[in-house]
Image (cartoon, grey):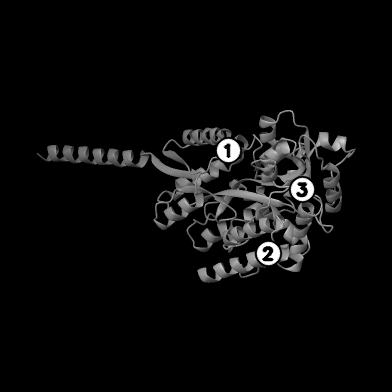
Amino acid sequence: MRKLLSGLSILALMMLAACRSTQKNEAIEITLSGWQSSPTESRLLKQVIDQFEKKYPNIRVKREVINSQYMDVIKTRLIGEVAPDVFYLDALEAPLLMKYKVLEPLNSYIKPEFKIADFEPTLLNAFRQNNQIYGIPKDFTTLALFYNKTAFTKANLTQPPKTWNEFIQYSKLLTKQGAVKQFGFAVTPELPRQQFLIQAFGGRLVDRNNYAVFASPEGLKGLQLVVNQYRRDRSAAQPSDVGANSGDEMFGRGNAAMMLSGAWTIPYFRETFPNLEFSTAEVPTINGKKGTMAYTVAYVMNRGSKHKEAAWKLIEYLTSPDGMKVSGNQGFALPSRRSVLTELGYDRDPLYAPLVAGARYATIWQAGETLPTILTNFDNQFISALLGEQPLSDAMKKAQDTANREIYLSN
């Protein structure tokens, strides 16, 4: 009897151990949410995720694409404690989520072998608060000057403008009336493209308390440059003025000879306008200073994730040199690791080099948690001023006052 009980006990212990082993090796599923900019980008991300799952066979990644109202969906899920484990976060939205502590601080996960110093500091700082890193930038782009080489040749222009005064003169020379109207400059009248202009003469977008202050004389001086090109010189146009959906399309169709745009434009032109002869240069200096914008997105971890170690492994792999080389070799955006940027040759490519150079002095598209409110009010009023419906100073004062009233009421 004792032998039988002993045998049964051993069997029970073996079964329990096997059960625990099965549970330990059971696959963990984590969710990665983001948007899809293009089918190619989606295919490349899937390729990296497949490689990750081979390396970590006990982790499964459920990928979710949210292309409509992305941040509204993410915020709602964070409130409901059903947010994804890992998700994309634009630098614009990062301050608010960092403030409310819904993101997992990553400092304790980052080991020396991850080589955090390899990332462009300006990009990393967009996701840093109180010495804690809350996101690892996956890619970025700056703005560069795109110019039509054929239009330049016809106008006897042999090199791109170096200063904004030259840029204004070029715009006039390149504006032509004909079967296809050609304007010197394609204007995108949105705050993400104008912030560096506000700062060019010493203006600021927000103050220390995140209230809008862009309607100062210094801020207006930079914005007036664009308004004058559009209203007074008639050497600039919006995409809607020529029936285009974007500045990229306007330029590609020959309705503009110059524009400011990012890395995504290069593969777009190669695919959509393969016969277009174009080049790039750094944004012309204003008031003797270099300036441009930079846009970046990071992978962040939900603080409420139940699988934080697995979530970090995914972030670590996606932003590793190997992962970044796969997703970063199509040119839609630039790798955020300096080593990968160099290895893929972007800093030596004539079209991408001006975009890379701009990273050293670019203004990150970010200005505190109130920026989404400021953005909406700015865009509405700036377009009104551009169209001549009201003076720029009145429009910006109205935008600033309305934004600040909304910010005050929300506090």
Q: Residues within 10 Å of mark 2 (few under 14, many from 20)?
A: many
Q: Nearer the viewer, mark 3 or mark 1?
A: 3
Left or right of 2, for residue 47: right
- Classify the position of the N terminus by image quarter: top left
Q: Which of pointers 3 and 2 lies earlier in the amino acid sequence?
A: 3
Query: In the figure, residue 310 lies in which quadrant?
Result: top left
Q: In the rendered view, would you say 39 is above or below 131?
A: above
Q: Which of pointers 2 and 1 lies earlier in the amino acid sequence?
A: 1
Residue occupied by mark 3: 236
Residue flagged by tag 3: what amino acid is it? Answer: Ala
Rendered residue at 62%/47% (across/down): 115
Residue flagged by tag 2: what amino acid is it? Answer: Met
Residue 342: which numbered mark, if any? none
Residue 323: which numbered mark, if any? 1
Residue occupied by mark 2: 396
Q: CA distance from mark 3 to mark 1?
A: 41 Å
- Which residue is more in the foreground, 181 or 32? 181
Rendered residue at 68%/64% (across/down): 396
Query: In the figure, residue 403 lies in which quadrant?
Result: bottom right
- Which residue is more in the foreground, 231 or 271? 231
Q: Nearer the viewer, mark 2 or mark 1?
A: 2
Q: Secondary structure at mark 1?
A: helix
In the orientation shown, which residue stands out farthest toward the top?
275
Residue 258: give x, y in percent of width and height.
77, 43
